[in-house]
Amino acid sequence: MSYLMKGGVAAATVGTTATGAYVGSRYLTNTTSVSKHLTSSGYKLISSIKNPDHLKLQWKEEFKSDKASIKSLLNLKEDDDESKGGEALGKWCTSKLAEEYSDKVDGLENVKKYCVIKSIKDWLIRNGNKAILTENQDDNSKWEATYNKRKQAKTPRTQTGLAEAWPADSGTDKKDTDLPIIKRWCKEKNDSDFLAYEDTYSHVKDWCTESTNA
């Protein structure tokens, strides 16, 4: 084999090796963002809300729900209002979600805590430690108290899928037929998303949690 041919083979070998090393290097360093990791793990990001007004409202409500902790996390001023706080939280989440994911990424738990859409169940707990009433007998009287409060307030029955209006005769009691329907509705909504632009959360809070004097 001539010197030139040997040189050509050697160059080709080096080129192939280099290409293989480059591809291997890219493969070995293949990374994913915090955003992609969370979505692939089943989380729904607040930033996935498409409507700008709805998104702005969601960030505002997220900020309001844990204002003191978020102000501390973001180093906000004490007099920063909820709109400014929501905007700052949105920017912080955008920055953190764009970071390269690892199980040691700084602030990951706070990203999960403040940058994802929560269920109505979790939102009830965050906002007042309430929980949806259960089918346990201990909750029977609580269901009745909540029902009676809605009846007294003439809260629209259609909010929970009940047909017809409240009876004109205040003495008429439809509780035995209404409560099973209400309980099913509450159970269905328990794990649905809390979306600030919808009324579902306030309806669940009114119909499905223990009645208070407020």
Image (cartoon, rainbow, N blue to C red):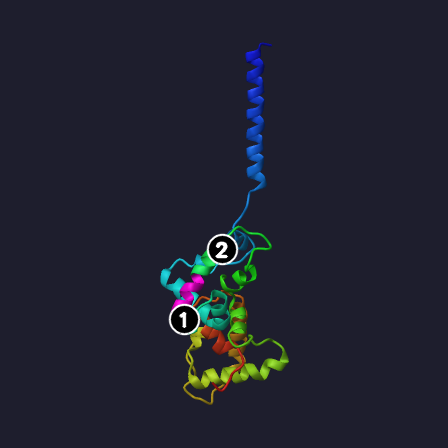
In the image, farthest residue toward the right: 137
Q: Residues within 10 Å of mark 2 (few under 14, many from 20)?
A: many
Can residue 89 be found in the magenta stretch?
yes
User: Callout 2, which amino acid?
Assistant: Leu
Image height check: is 4 above or below 23? above
> Relative to 63, is 138 on the left or the right?
right
Badge 2 vs badge 1, beta-carbon distance below 8 Å = no
Image height check: is 10 above or below 72? above
- For residue 69, the mark is none
User: Callout 1, which amino acid?
Assistant: Glu
Image coordinates for residue 127, horizontal then vertical, percent: 51, 74
Image height check: is 67 above or below 49? below
Q: Read off the magenta span.
A: 80-90
Q: Please count the marks in the image.
A: 2
Residue 184: name its quadrant: bottom right
- For residue 82, the mark is 1
Image coordinates for residue 30, horizontal then vertical, percent: 55, 43
Q: Main secondary structure of the magenta part?
A: helix
Q: Kindly identify which residue carries mark 2.
A: 97
SS of the residue under disc 2: helix
Image coordinates for residue 35, horizontal then vertical, percent: 50, 53
Q: CA distance from mark 2 to mark 1?
A: 22 Å
Q: Does residue 160 show up?
A: no
Instruction: State which quarter of the image contains the N terminus.
Output: top right
Name the residue: 44% across, 69% down.
61
Q: Does residue 55 show up?
A: yes
Depth check: give the residue in front, 129 or 194: 129
